[in-house]
Image: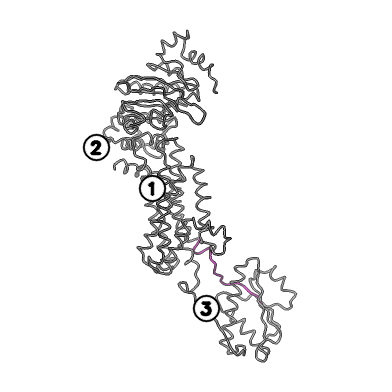
Amino acid sequence: MRQFLIFTQKEFYHILRDRWTTVLLLILPIAMILLFGFGITTEIKNTRFAVYDMSHDMATRGIVNKLETSEYFTLEGYLDHPGQIEGIFKRKKIGMLVVFGERFYENQLHSGDAQVQLITDGTDPNTASTLTNYATNLIREYQQESGTLSPLPIQILPQVKLLYNPTMKSAYNIVPGVIGMVLMLVCAMMTSVSLAREKEMGTMEVILVSPMPPLLIVLSKVVPYFTISMINLFNVLLLAVFVLEVPIVGNLFLLIFVSLLFIFVALALGILISTLVQTQLVALLASVMGLLLPVVMLSGLMFPIENMPVVLQYVAQIIPAKWYIEAMRNVMIKGLGISAIIKEVLVLALMAVVLITISLKKFKIRLE
Amino acid sequence: MKAIAAHNLTKRFGSFTAVDSISFEVDKGEIFGFLGANGAGKTTAMRMLCGLLIPTSGAGQVAGHDIYKNPEQVKANIGYMSQKFALYEDLKVWENLRLYGGIYGVPAEEIDGKIDILLKRLGFEEEKNTMVRSLPLGWKQKLAFSAAIFHEPQIVFLDEPTGGVDPVARRQFWELIYDASDRGITVFVTTHYMDEAEYCDRVSIMVDGRIEVLDSPAQMKKTFQADTMDEVFQQLARKAERT
């Protein structure tokens, strides 16, 4: 037991005496959550738009006004003739152009066939479709308010309501993902790098010759990073709730339980990597390529898994973060209980058991 | 009982025989030099004796324990200093010593006192709180040796302990080895430096995985009609087929 305590203490010295390691471990997660929470966002605000209006009547003015007063759009100006359409997209930074047909108001009243065209910049399809959605909704709102709904006999007007995230804040989506990423980074990468460092420095050889049981060596490597992971989890949750204003709807203990499970998986992965590599650099590269990139690309953090090619969808299933992020979204954002995430919990538990068994087996008592 | 006994100890990596059926015995308190060119199999042989490698065949006892059946008993009774300098650079001098003491199970209440005595003997009290990183290499090596014998093992294995330091520092290092030997610790040391071979009670010279000769330095020089151990070594090393 004392062997274990002394060895763990030494590990904490390594972390705390290297300023950059400390920064990396404690500041990076905070920076990441703020960066992702504020910077990377799928919402669109204050997009500038221009109008080519062939009618200039009260209906078109009303619609333009409606768009302009929304938080999504700002009016850039009017075009005089259609020849300017191409030019304005190239010259000015506008996101959308609204074109009204001739005699818009009259047509609307009499034939119900008033035409409005929305032109967006398709180089970024996601933004383009989001913008047209916003604009379409605003135009429909205008119609309702002005009582000039087209006189079709039967009207179906979908009322869209976003559950759990009514204001469409992307932080709701990002926070569980970033927690997953941070935990993976801290646990797996740092564990593998610190074990690889002992190999590189030659100290591993000396420890392996000592009577210290291999299980204790591994455990005392794991405990400091486990502690730091808990601190990080706490920090990130605090930031999420108080700065990004993402509420924790579900049970906090369930949330911590799922996170613990995921931390075990990540730590085991870190040990596994360290048994396969000899140097810190390779450990670092293996962690980034093998863990971090899949977490970012394939876990559903940024890109929905349902939209991936089938092969990648299968690959995504073996990524622990995918299951973790799904469970976190369910608990944290939707407020669901254990019964809703039982599948995720079981998958993570299975991964933890398998990985810990393999990595402990592979961790060599002897060098060869 | 011998401190170390090896009988036909062999290690193969695939088709390559790194250590080819070596047999030797080391007496208690002896300073045993384990010589050989690079790649002759010294480190592999030593690692088998320390329980870092499993022998392909043959048997060995270290401190009276079988290296195959009781590696844990072997480990508890030996000290080891690796080829790479193996103290933690970002720990202080006394923290390193306490760590190794702790790993080898030296009782907590004894550790602090032992550290003070040891540093005093080395004339090193001033540097107790110095980060190991900022010490000169010669001092690091002395410290690493002191850490390796901090728990008073029966046998200490030194793998090229004096690589890269000047003759004065090497001489000082050997004084520490003599000290340890006087206290009854058996010293098993590999080295490249033939002047160091002269300091050993007995030396063995390995060529291509086999022990070619095993004798005291004086006797060996007589047998080979050489003035120095270096000449002996040159004559033997020339026979090597491995490079």
The structure residue drawn at horizontal position 65% and vertical position 88%, both measured from the top left corner, is A112
Where does residue B156 sit, x and y in percent of width and height? 35, 26
Q: Chain of mark 1?
A: A
The numbered mark 3 sits on a residue in which chain? A
CA–CA distance in space, label 2 to label 1: 27 Å
Q: Disc 2 residue type?
A: Glu
B234 to A130, vertically: above or below: above
Q: Badge 1: few (under 14), some or many (20 or more) residues near its Cα, within 10 Å? A: many
User: Which x, y percent locates residue B80?
Assistant: 37, 30
**Label disc, if present, on residue A160 of the rendered structure:** 3
- Residue A143 lies, with reference to residue B145, above or below; the image says below
The local secondary structure at tag 3 comes to: loop
What amino acid is found at the position of numbered circle 3 in the picture?
Answer: Val
Which residue position is annotated with label 1? Answer: A222
Magenta stretch encompasses residue A298:
no
Residue A47 covered by magenta stretch: yes
Residue B111's spot in the image, x, y percent? 27, 35
Amino acid type at circle 1 is Val
| Region rendered in magenta | A36-50
Give the residue furthest to the right: A83
Residue A35 horizontal side relative to residue B53, left or right: right
Depth check, front residue: B70 or A57: B70
Q: Are marks 2 and 3 in contact (CB under 8 Å)?
A: no
- Please state which of residues A246 and B18 is positioned toward the viewer in this rendering: B18
Residue A63: mark: none
The outermost residue toward the bottom is A110
The residue pinned by badge 2 equals B109
Q: Is residue A124 above or below residue B115?
A: below
